[in-house]
Amino acid sequence: MHRTRVRVIEDALDANTTIARANRADFERAGVRVVNLMSAPGAGKTTLLERTLARLGAGNGAARAGVPRIGVLEGDVQGTLDADRLASLHVPVVQINTDPGFGGECHLDANMVRSALGAIPLDRLDLLVIENVGNLVCPAEFQVGEHHRVMVASVTEGEDKPLKYPLMFRACELVVVNKIDLLPHLAFDLDRFLYNVDAVHPGVRRLLVSARTGEGIDDWCEWLVGAAR
């Protein structure tokens, strides 16, 4: 029974990888770079995107030189709350709900993303940000065709998260530490957290930001614009 279960899981991941390659080929034909934004629930991904889109002025066709045309693929189990917030900034937003159509999964996989490609105006985008379902386990296991993976970690989550969920931190190329404006009010050891990040993913780039106050957002925007190139 154990071997059968392992084999089924391997087959599912292999099938996902095949679809992810097809997604990526479609993205590259359209000249679109894709960032998979992952985190635990409540880490502040949507607020970070709101602040980012407002700072870049990426809505309404991104008329300013050097500003990528950005779209968002929003993943949630149910509802459109986050998508509605981002759509108010006048960027293309497509919602994927994993319940009921995909069994209420706690992550986006390549097939879910593929099901939404017809609704995404790839020919009018330079960068697509996929805001994955909030979860510290499954999103790291499923490629969706992205070029970059970013992990958003909130200082409200505790210093031990990299040690408890190492795959999520190993799977990304950038760790964005959010809500640093709360550090004076928390018993959170930032140095210990960064040490733990290095323990599971030595040398991974880190950015310290506050999506609420805007601290560090310029560095994050610079990274994102670079990813779009």
Image (spheres, rainbow, N blue to C red):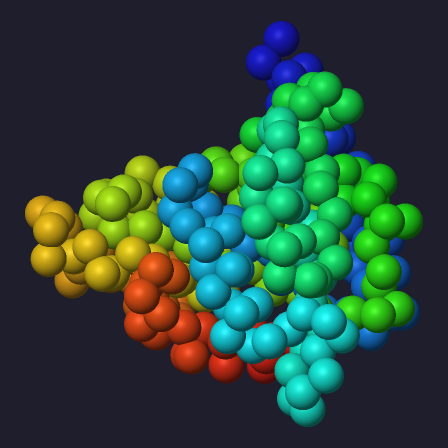
Place of residue 220 in the rendered image (x, y in percent of width and height, measured from the top left): 45, 73
> Is 169 situated left or right of 184 in this image?
right
> Is 161 situated left or right of 60 in this image?
left
Q: Is residue 144 visible?
A: yes
Outermost residue, bottom direction? 65
Place of residue 107 in the rendered image (x, y in percent of width and height, measured from the top left): 60, 35
Which residue is pictured at 73% across the width and 31% down the height? 12
Is residue 80 or residue 168 the one in the foreground? 80
Place of residue 228 in the rendered image (x, y in percent of width and height, measured from the top left): 66, 76
Is residue 75 or residue 58 the one in the foreground? 58
Which residue is pictured at 39% across the width and 47% down the height? 43
- The quarter in which the N terminus is drawn is top right
Which residue is pictured at 42% across the width and 79% down the height? 218
Place of residue 9 in the rendered image (x, y in percent of width and height, measured from the top left): 66, 27
Task: Using the rendered view, name the quadrant where residue 77 is placed.
Answer: top right
- The quarter in which the C terminus is drawn is bottom right
Task: Using the rendered view, name the quadrant where residue 176 is placed.
Answer: bottom left
Q: Is residue 109 visible?
A: no
